Amino acid sequence: MVSKNNWKGKSFLTWSDIDSQVKVLCAKIIKSGFEFDTIATISRGGLVPARLVADNFDIKKILVDKKKIPKKTLFVDDIYDSGDTFNKVLSIVEKPKSFLYATMVARRGEKYPKQLVYAKKTLGSEYVVFPWDKLEFKREPKSH
């Protein structure tokens, strides 16, 4: 579960946390049996996790912000929160039944689709701040 450095309803993950979660996530991707030759992601949030997963699977090309996701593509994101991003991505996947959505963190209490694999769950509804989000988090109004 995500619990590192929880401060006032926020959970701040470290690079060490991310390293551990990438290992767990990659093991779950392998265990799923999903075969892929491409990784896709969105530029906001998913870029860093996608690169880390791609390195683990020796995949050289990552599709970013595409309007269509080809079959045999693993989609990687930082967090499965409300399911909105998942649903948007699912609508542009060539073969939705053969699709896997891999994420570092999944929001506890959400209903997870069968195509989701994740490394960790949140403890509750805390706002998760990833290492690549820290500057953005500091600039945002404190409504998190």
Image: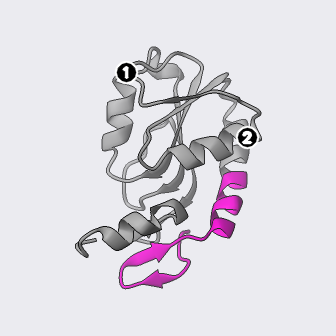
Q: What is the x, y in percent for residue 84? A: 30, 42
Does the magenta portion include 79?
Answer: no
Q: Quadrant of residue 8?
A: bottom left
Question: Regarding mark 2 in the picture, which secondary structure is present there?
Answer: helix
Rendered image: mark on residue 4: none
Residue 30, position in %: x, y? 73, 37
Q: Which residue bears the numbered disc 1?
A: 67
**Residue 87: which quarter of the image?**
top left
Residues rendered magenta in the picture:
1-24
Give the camera-side residue of 126 and 109. Answer: 126
Figure quadrant of the N terminus: bottom right
Image quadrant where one finds the C terminus:
bottom left
The answer to whether residue 126 of the structure is visible from this angle is no
Dot 2 amino acid type:
Asp
Q: Nearest the camera: 111 or 70?
A: 70
Can see residue 134?
A: yes
